[in-house]
Amino acid sequence: GIQVEQSPPDLILQEGANSTLRCNFSDSVNNLQWFHQNPWGQLINLFYIPSGTKQNGRLSATTVATERYSLLYISSSQTTDSGVYFCAAAGSYQLTFGKGTKLSVIP
Amino acid sequence: GAVVSQHPSRVICKSGTSVKIECRSLDFQATTMFWYRQFPKQSLMLMATSNEGSKATYEQGVEKDKFLINHASLTLSTLTVTSAHPEDSSFYICSAIRRTGGTEAFFGQGTRLTVV
């Protein structure tokens, strides 16, 4: 199956800073999604982005399918952005999750 | 949007009893649903793929007799943890894909199971 690697595993930012989270995947995909897991465990769907670029407010994502990676950009970070960010990829329908990036935004 | 509702959100049960978790797609029909398990501070691991009207497909290492999955309709899949033991305590999350096409998965809120 597909292997998904995320980096960095941990990231500490000062409030207001920008950050880039990376997701590498081992094979061609027809689904790639980014999630933010809140403190209660719920997965918040950030982007469905098997290819191309999307933006939603301070967040944007780019997937370069031919090079098998995706990037999540967070600009002007806020303390509420803290949490774990997961990338998940699928070659068909079954998503494989990366290990996540734990983001801590400090005031 | 596409909403997936999971119930209960939290359950505590005694060792040896069974617990049923429901996963419903509220505003769309889902041919395929998935069940994941997450241990503390770890990632989500796929347990099984559930297709409406057919038997679930389990991932390697997942006991199908312990984790019974039923997908009787296009909007409901259930996971029953049978004869639960403390090591079954975990966070269980379901997801669903629209029957009308596309590959985007929509996730439920998750169920935190504690077996005492």
Image (cartoon, coloured by chain):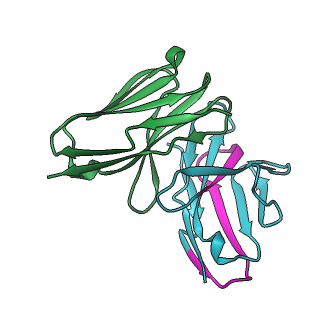
Left or right of A7 on screen, residue B73: right
Name the main secondary structure of what is drawn in magenta. Answer: strand
Looking at the rendering, in which quadrant would you find the N terminus of chain A?
top right
Q: Would you place residue A100 above or below residue B21 in this image?
A: above
Residue A6 belongs to the span the image colors magenta:
no
Q: Would you place residue A84 above or below residue A69 in this image?
A: below
| Total number of numbered discs in the rendering | 0
Q: Which chain is green?
A: A
Residue drawn at x 42%, y 63% is: A40
Q: Would you place residue A76 above or below residue B7 in this image?
A: above
Which residue appears farthest toward the right when viewing the image?
Answer: B54
Relative depth, front residue between A71 and B25:
A71
Which residue appears farthest toward the top when viewing the image?
Answer: A66
Where's residue A13, x and y in %?
21, 44
- Occupied quadrant, residue A91: top right
Residue drawn at x 71%, y 57% is: B77
Where's residue A15, x and y in %?
16, 45
Which region shows up in magenta?
A: B11-37
Where's residue A21, x and y in %?
36, 34
Residue B15 belongs to the span the image colors magenta:
yes
Relative depth, front residue between B93 and B1:
B93
Q: Which chain is cyan?
A: B
Left or right of A58 on screen, residue B55: right
Left or right of B115 on screen, residue A76: left
Residue drawn at x 50%, y 35% is: A5
